[in-house]
Each structure stands twice: as structure tokens, then as C-alpha cells.
Amino acid sequence: MNPLQLSKTIAILSIFLLVSCDNYRFKNIIGNYYLVKSETQSDMYSLNYNYDGGYPCVINKNVIAIGFDKNFLLVKQAKDTKIKFYIILHPLETKNTPQDIEYKIGPLNRIELENKRKELAIPDTIYFYNIK
């Protein structure tokens, strides 16, 4: 193999390795919050937070719908046959790690979510949009 062929082979292998190692796709939702889609399980999404260049998980797997405005991020998660809801407060102003309990409320069932929406005055104009 001549040097030119070797260079091409190395370049192709490098590109293949970079692409194959990237098993996730990131989609910015609001502020530092990202939906992360697993390419190995095409219907699997999680909600992550960009913190110091890393993306710790806020809501692990099975995120199926989201809704947001500048003050609230609502997340719907399906695990087995159960539906859970989460509220992220002040998604544009969050400065700490997403594990800080003051920014994340949940899991909640539908009734708890509706009560919390009233309590926090979360507008009815925030609808859940399916991810898929």
C-alpha cells in the first residue's frame, strides 16, 4: 500500500470511528436544556443539561413530550404503562447543576401536575408537544 492509499484508509477509518462513536444527537430546547436522542434506540429520549461542557441527565430516558416558555419547562415521561410529569423552573436562569431540587419538581401524576400548574400559575398556553 502506497502512502496515498494509506492516508486515505486512515482518513476513512477515522471518520467511521467518529461517526460510529457518536451514539447521541443533541437538540437544544431552551437555555442549557437539551433533548438527547439515542441512535441505538431510536425512540429513546432523555432530558439533559449542559453543565461545564458535560451533559448530566435531568430526566432519564423515555421522555415523550415537552412544553415550555421562558419560565417553565414541562416534561412528560412514559415508563412501562405509567405516565409521569416534571416541571423545570426558570430554565433560562438555572445556574446550578440540574440535580438541585429547587429547579425540578416531580415526578408528578396528571392530577398533581394540574394542581402544581395552578399553584405556580403556569400558563395554559404551554402545551405538550410529542417528540416523535
Image: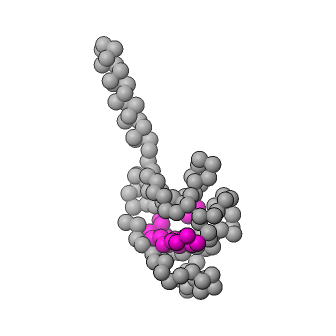
Viewport quadrant of the C terminus: bottom left
The residue at 45%/50% (across/down) is 24
> Is residue 10 depicted above or below 81 in this figure?
above
Residue drawn at 47 percent across, 70 percent down? 66
Q: Is residue 73 placed above or below 111 in the rendered structure?
A: above
| Rendering quarter of residue 129 | bottom left
Q: How many marks?
A: 0
Q: Confirm whether the magenta stretch covers residue 80.
A: yes
Q: Quadrant of the N terminus?
A: top left
Residue 29 percent coordinates (x, y): 49, 62
Q: Nearer the viewer, residue 62 or 15?
A: 15
Q: How is the structure coloured here?
A: one colour
> Residue at horizontal 48%, vertical 58%?
28
State the image coordinates of residue 131 (x, y, percent, origin top left). Answer: 41, 66
Q: Nearer the viewer, residue 9 or 90?
A: 90
Residue 33 higher or lower than 81, as above or below: above
**Residue 45, image x and y in percent?**
46, 61
Furthest residue toward top: 2
**Image position, residue 81 (x, y; %):** 46, 75
Q: Is residue 29 magenta?
A: no
Left or right of 17 in this view: 48:
right
Looking at the image, residue 97 sits to the left or right of residue 36; the answer is right
Residue 129 visible, this orientation: yes
Residue sitting at x 44%, y 44% = 22
What secondary structure is the stretch in magenta mostly built from?
Answer: strand
Query: Looking at the image, can residue 112 be seen?
Result: no
In magenta, the rendered stretch is: 57-81
Image height check: is 71 above or below 5?
below
